[in-house]
Amino acid sequence: MDFLIGHYNYWIVIILMMVGLYTVISRGNLIKKIIGLNIFQVSVFFLYISMGTVEGGAAPIIAEGIKVYSNPLPHVLILTAIVVGVATTALALALVVRIKESYGTIEEDEIHNLDHSL
Amino acid sequence: MGNNISLLLVVIPLIAAPVVAVLPRGRLPWAVATVVAALCAVLAAMQLWMVLDGGTISYELGGWAPPWGIEYRIDAVNAFVALIVAAIATITLPYALLSTEREIPEEKIPLFYSAMLLCLTGLLGITQTGDIFNVFVFLEISSLSSYALISLGRQRQALTAAYQYLIMGTVGATFYLIGVGLIYSQTGTLNMQDLATILPGVQHLKTVDTGFAFIMIGIALKLALFPLHLWLPNAYTYAPSVVTVFLAATATKVAVYVMLRILFMVFPHGFALATPAEELFIVAGIAGILIASVYAIYQEDIKRLLAYSSVAQIGYMALGIGFASAMSVTATLIHLFNHALMKGALFMAVGAIIYRIGACRMDQIHGLGRAMPWTFGAIVIGGLSLVGVPGTAGFISKWYLVAAALEQGAWISVAAILIGSLLAVVYVGKLIEALYFRPVTDTGKVISEAPMLLLMPTWVLVFANIYFGLDTALTVGVAEKAAAILLGGGAS
């Protein structure tokens, strides 16, 4: 039981990761794929952030009387990764808009049919 | 000056990118981008010359000492790859002028060159940095700009190709990120040098194994290692000609470099041998060479044919990584360089055909070889190099790879390399047959030779194919030094 509860952050990460990856693979709607990709990326953000926590540690701001601090570096890394994730999502959405304009649909199978019926 | 080169290589194209984006339309954005690329090539050549004696350059970003700060660490390996990237950019950009004027809407041209420079920044950044998280950031800079570049293709399939690449590329990059996180959780460092000293102490942990697996799969997606290559044929086929030339000659090469660096220099020597990674590389390499080559034979679109051939060529590099001997890693590095030359030349020649007739399907190019003799000549010599005919660069890489396979007694791999070359004869032959021996389809249009500005860069690469097939002092010399660093670094 301790194993289950003690590692709860990892369970959340694994569940989110699988939900996200499954959505990317199984959905035919281009927007839903992007949502899946976002969930997948967010799970990795959680992995980093929860990893940086030190048990009993305070926020990493120097103050008197505090000896144990959490590790701020994973948080900083994830700030960068969030920026990358936002840029990726923006670009992906822009592509979907263009796809909708030229195909009139954002369903993968319909796009496939349009390309191969010519 | 010495140390600063490593940073300048990244900063110059990075600063130039937004500048180019706001320049007025016309040829100015192109001129600036070309000058920047040429400057980078000169700096990269100086950098390689400085580290060739076996030394390393270390640059501390913002004055923070490694392993806390980000370090740019240059040795013969990454200086060599940086030079390939910068040199290919310098040869591609003069070619880009006419090709983009034909293929890309006028109002998007400044943005196009801006994205090209960003892509160059990302690729050079990957080669320069000595920090595994920084690799992720640059990987995404180059990937995001290449998604945008691919989506500029003339057909609407370019959009879906870019989307598909974006999804697979992002999954790959995120896998890499997971791997880096897991490794960081056990070592507390991101600096490659530092990791190499800490990892031997924790290499028995399952977390490190898992992190290693995530990193390998993530990069394998980026370098389009068979069977993770699904994004590549569409992306190369529908991208604008210039983008195909640039990406085919540089992007996958840089991913191979990251693979080599992490496999041999970050992880302790022998770590990969204890995992199935080496066998997987050999199996994926052989499967890639054979299956992708067969696929190439059946393609009706020339760009797609060459794209499948690229997947097969990556198979050769994977074989070299799999054998993990000094000889085989040398072969991989030589092929990295030579493949950039041959695919660069071939895709440029195909781009010249697209410039003239606006298409590149097998049934539309019948007899074109006689109307465009110089373009045809480039395809013949590039094709021979791809096959590995003696006297061309392709022969040198195959020679070293076969020698490395024989050294290990890996007969199946030797057979795969030779069969792969025979399959290349078939698809290159098919291309030449359509271009020269088929009767001209009468469209009523008179087709003339491609303009000089397209032919010159193509032939620079064609001559390089012949030159580096005859004089191997530069390629083999540098690759042997680089291989010694890669294989020696992990052991110490």
Image (spheres, coloured by chain):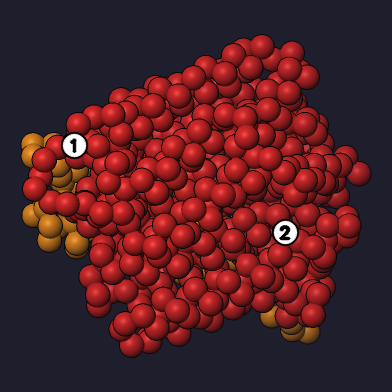
Chain colours: A orange, B red
Residues packed near mark 1 inside 10 Å, few (<14), some (14 to 19) or many (20 plus): some
Element on which disc 1 rests: loop
Residue B269 lies in what quarter of the image? Answer: top right
The residue wearing badge 2 is: B79
Between B261 and B213, the one nearer to me in the picture: B261
The residue wearing badge 1 is: B440
Residue B125: horizontal and vertical position, in percent? 61, 64
Residue B415 lies in what quarter of the image? Answer: top right
- Residue at the location (48% across, 69% down)? B118
Residue B399 lies in what quarter of the image? Answer: top right
Q: Is residue A63 above or below residue B385?
A: below
Q: Earlier in the sequence, mark 1 or mark 2?
A: 2
Element on which disc 2 rests: helix
Q: Is residue A13 above or below residue A54?
A: above
- Please report, as a chain letter, where disc 2 is located: B
Quadrant containing the C terminus of chain B is top right
Between A80 and A58, the one nearer to me in the picture: A80
- Residue at the location (40% across, 65% down)? B453
Contact, mark 1 vs mark 2 (Cβ under 8 Å)? no
Give the amino acid at mark 1. Val
Please state if B367 lies on the left or on the right of B11 as rendered: left
- Residue at the location (66% across, 11% down)? B411
Quadrant containing the N terminus of chain B is bottom right
Determine if residue B72 is in view: no
